[in-house]
Amino acid sequence: MARENPSLCHRIIELREKILNFTELQKIIAAGESLTLELKKSTAEKERACRSMCALANGQGGQVVFGITPSGKVLGQKVTDRTLEELAQEFQGFEPPLCLHLQRLPLSEGDGRGLEVLIVHVDRATDAPVSFRGIPYERVLNTTCVMPRANYQRLLIESMHTSDRWEMQPAIGCSVEELDSLEIVVTLEESIRRGRSLDPGTRDTMGILRGLGLLVNGEQLSRAAVALFCKDEVALPAFPQFMLRVARFKGTNRDEFLDNRQYTGNAFALMRRAERFLIDWLPVAGKIVPGQMARIDTPALPTDAVREALANAFIHRDYTSAGGSVAVALYDDRLEIISPGELHFGLTPEMLYQPHESKPWNPWIAKVFYRRGLIETWGRGTLKIASLMQEAGLPVPVLHENTGCVLMTFKLPKPYVGVNEGVNEGVNEGVNEGVNEGVNEGVNALVELIKQRQGMRVPALAELMNTSPKNLERWLKQLRDAGQIEFIGSSKTGGYYPKQ
């Protein structure tokens, strides 16, 4: 262990006993310089090394090692009190100050006797962004670069987020009358049923909100309370971001809509509407059971995986942007779930598919989703999605950041291009034989589809059945003549339903 020198600034340098042994260090060096490792030939490069320490503190943390060349050759150097004092002096350039852990490893073999390797362990800064001599740095792969202004602002927002989060600011001008009291009671009841809350013995709205931690400044509603429980389909001028956009596009681009809708409301209501939209539009493979008027339906994507992705979109979204909204876009070949905002706290898309610490951007909103039973555990959402997709034999969704949003893309498997793989075969066998005299598979599948997705119209039914509107009209006529279905409503807004 290094001998402590009173002249060192212990607020910045903390000398610790064995953090790494030499064998462990060699394994790290063998992997080469990286996002978390910088190698320096000697402390003569202390200024450049401090820039890298600044970058590591603004990222995931890591080590700067003196006495080893960037190629990995171990040289060592003489480490004296003067060496440590010069380092401590250089460390005064960090703002805010860093707590760095210094370790000395002596070389005991060959020409290295009397020399040491000096390791500086850098923790991820709790008060990022950190600058060195007035300039912030970041790590890009194995290189230290000046941090772009946008990244600096993002880190600054993250630093302020702990004490000044949007969700826990008072919802000025909002009253409890603007909240859905039934949604609040249902949340409590579900939380009690799942053992995630004790029964408070009251169903008073303000009492429940207080127990959920959604009141601030005494008895004032928080913004989180309004986001979670505002009345469905009631526009709030102060919160235009409480919105969901859903669309079904024809083909694989956004040139033509088959369906396009927008909804306003609380997070739970919007999530239900997103699920309803996907039930209506997500391809379903149907298999007719021989000798029975029944069909086995298999959804194109595991429903639990899609639900988890939707929940994550509402939990982690950035609510500060008045123009932001969760969006669901369905194409012929893929499903996209889009959440406004960026990944924070140093997380990357790759890290989210590995075990990682849970750091929800809106922790109080996340807590209520957890109590409601819409998420199981924090920090495992993406891991659960990946597991469910792999169990279904499907590729793991692609997660990446676009400008101002996080996008999760589910690839639809090719067998799900149509709803029923026997539809066209049924047409060729002769639909005109009549419904009661041996219904073919195509018409049979249409009956089941209308039972499951009541109120749909010809364009949507034709798309799901993978057939032309003209052909679908013939099938519908036969089913109406047979008394199995009926059209309810006006010609513009009505749809097909099973006949009771």
Image: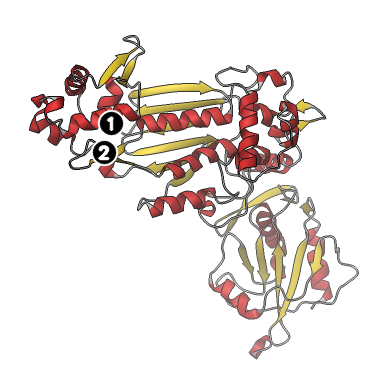
Colouring method of the image? secondary structure
- Residue 199 at what x, y percent from top left? 71, 39
- Residue 148 at what x, y percent from top left? 61, 43
Mark 2 or mark 1, earlier in chain: 2
Residue at figure coordinates x 34%, y 14% from the top left: 494
Q: What SS does tag 1 mark? A: helix
Q: What SS does tag 2 mark? A: strand
Tell me the amino acid under the disc marked 1: Glu
Describe residue 124's horizontal placement relative to residue 261 as left or right: right
Residue at figure coordinates x 18%, y 38% from the top left: 422
Quadrant the C terminus occupies: top left
The residue labelled by disc 2 is 295
Mark number displayed over residue 448 = 1
Q: Nearer the viewer, residue 499 or 86?
A: 499
Residue at figure coordinates x 29%, y 20% from the top left: 499
Describe residue 171's horizontal placement relative to residue 305 as left or right: right
